[in-house]
Image (cartoon, grey):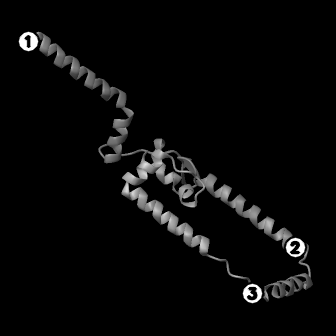
């Protein structure tokens, strides 16, 4: 067995929920790291078995009942309170949709006009212009490699 498979079985083996097979026992005896981890798991489980949850305060129920009485005695909040929160959420969602739709896409907003990056004129000879030229003429330039290969082959065939 692999160490990863043993690590998946360790919680069950440490708590005694799963029975160890002979193959698992063999691996645990031969692999010191997995055997050590299993021992650590068993020690941790033993400590957790000894742990006891603290008892709640004897005044907890009294304070809880007093707090409930206070909340029930408060005057009810008007209908405006319940309308205000959904209205705020709807307006925030609307603003987010409008903001995302304005800045989404490839368009660039300039003085009320939307123009795409492809429509922008770039000076030839600049790095951006050269990259755009290479991108636009990729198919043409890739054919040059084929022509070079054909020329090399014709020179080899011509000069035996």
Mark 2, other Cα within 10 Å: few <14 / some 14–19 / many ≥20: few
Secondary structure type for disc 3: loop
**What is the x, y in percent for residue 73?**
92, 85
- Residue 3 visible: no
Residue on which disc 2 sits: 80
Residue on which disc 1 sits: 159
| Residue plotted at (67% across, 55% down) | 97
Mark 3, other Cα within 10 Å: few <14 / some 14–19 / many ≥20: few
Question: In the rendered view, does 102 fall on the left or right side of 65?
Answer: left
Residue 132 is labelled as none
Q: Tell me the distance, in whole angstroms, between the alpha carbons under discs 2 and 3.
A: 39 Å
Which label lies toward us, 2 or 3?
Answer: 3
Question: In the rendered view, does 151 fall on the left or right side of 78?
Answer: left
Q: Say if 46 sits above or below 63 in the image.
A: above
In what quadrant of the picture does the N terminus appear?
A: top left
100 or 14: nearer the viewer: 14
Residue on which disc 3 sits: 57
**What is the x, y in percent for residue 62?**
84, 88
**What is the x, y in percent for residue 154?**
17, 13
Which label lies toward us, 1 or 3?
Answer: 3
Lower position in the chain sequence, tag 2 or tag 1: 2
| Residue plotted at (57% across, 55% down) | 12
Question: In the rendered view, does 25 fall on the left or right side of 57?
Answer: left
Lower position in the chain sequence, tag 2 or tag 3: 3
- Residue extending farthest to the front is 22
| Residue plotted at (90% across, 81% down) | 72
């Amino acid at each position: 067995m692999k160490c990863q498979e043993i690590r998946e079985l360790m919680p069950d083996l440490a708590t005694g929920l799963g029975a160890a097979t002979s193959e698992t026992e063999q691996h645990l005896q031969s692999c010191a790291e997995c055997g050590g981890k299993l021992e650590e798991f068993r020690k941790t489980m033993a400590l957790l078995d000894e742990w006891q949850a603290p008892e709640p305060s004897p005044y907890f129920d009294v304070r809880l009942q007093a707090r409930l009485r206070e909340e029930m005695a408060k005057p009810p909040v008007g209908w405006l309170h319940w309308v205000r929160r959904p209205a705020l959420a709807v307006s925030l969602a609307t603003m987010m949709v409008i903001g995302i739709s304005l800045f989404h896409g490839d368009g660039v907003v300039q003085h009320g006009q939307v123009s795409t990056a492809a429509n922008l004129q770039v000076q030839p000879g600049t790095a951006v212009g050269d990259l755009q030229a290479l991108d636009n003429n990729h198919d043409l330039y890739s054919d040059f490699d084929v022509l070079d290969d054909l020329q090399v082959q014709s020179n080899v065939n011509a000069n035996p």
